């Protein structure tokens, strides 16, 4: 979801994912993804979306690569690549 004049969009997550899982997985893959909880006023309800910013990427290819990374994350299973140390 987005607004035509916005540089941000909300990506609703598939069932099973939390926004924190997606954000952590993005960080592991070198992509910064903002979890929905960072923008929540009410912390009681789970947020099942992440916010993606597409503000002036250095190149379109860099933007494409980042979006491909996000798509790759969501094609996997929640927690599949997260390692506990």
Image (cartoon, rainbow, N blue to C red):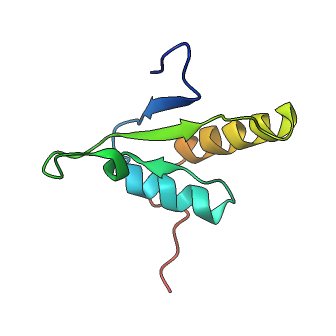
Q: Residue 81 sits in which quadrant?
A: bottom right
Residue at 54 percent of width and 31 percent of height: 8
Residue in the foreground of this view, choosing between 72 and 57: 57
Could you tell whether 14 is left or right of 64 in the image?
Answer: left
Task: Name the residue located 44 percent from the left edge and 41 percent from the top edge.
Answer: 50
**Residue 18 in view:** no
Query: Residue 27's quadrant in the figure?
Result: bottom right
How far from the left and from the top, in percent, is residue 2? Answer: 48, 20
Above or below — where is 81 with respect to 35?
A: below
* Image quadrant where one finds the N terminus: top left
Q: Nearer the viewer, residue 57 or 69?
A: 57
Q: Position of residue 47 (x, y in %)?
A: 28, 43
Work out which residue is located at the far top of the displayed protein and give it. 4
Percent of width and height locating residue 6: 54, 23
The correct choice, above or below, for 82 with respect to 56 in the image is: below
Q: Check the image and report above or below for 9 versus 57.
A: above
What residue is rendered at 34% in x and 38% in y?
Answer: 15
Compare residues 40 and 13 and report the one nearer the observer: 40
């Amino acid at each position: 979801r987005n607004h035509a004049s916005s540089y941000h969009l909300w990506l609703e997550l598939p069932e099973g994912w939390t926004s924190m899982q997606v954000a952590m997985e993005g960080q592991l893959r070198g992509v910064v993804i903002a979890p929905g909880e960072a923008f929540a006023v009410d912390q009681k309800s789970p947020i099942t979306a992440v916010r993606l910013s597409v503000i002036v990427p250095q190149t379109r290819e860099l933007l494409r690569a980042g979006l491909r990374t996000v798509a790759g994350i969501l094609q996997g299973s929640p927690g599949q690549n997260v390692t506990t140390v």
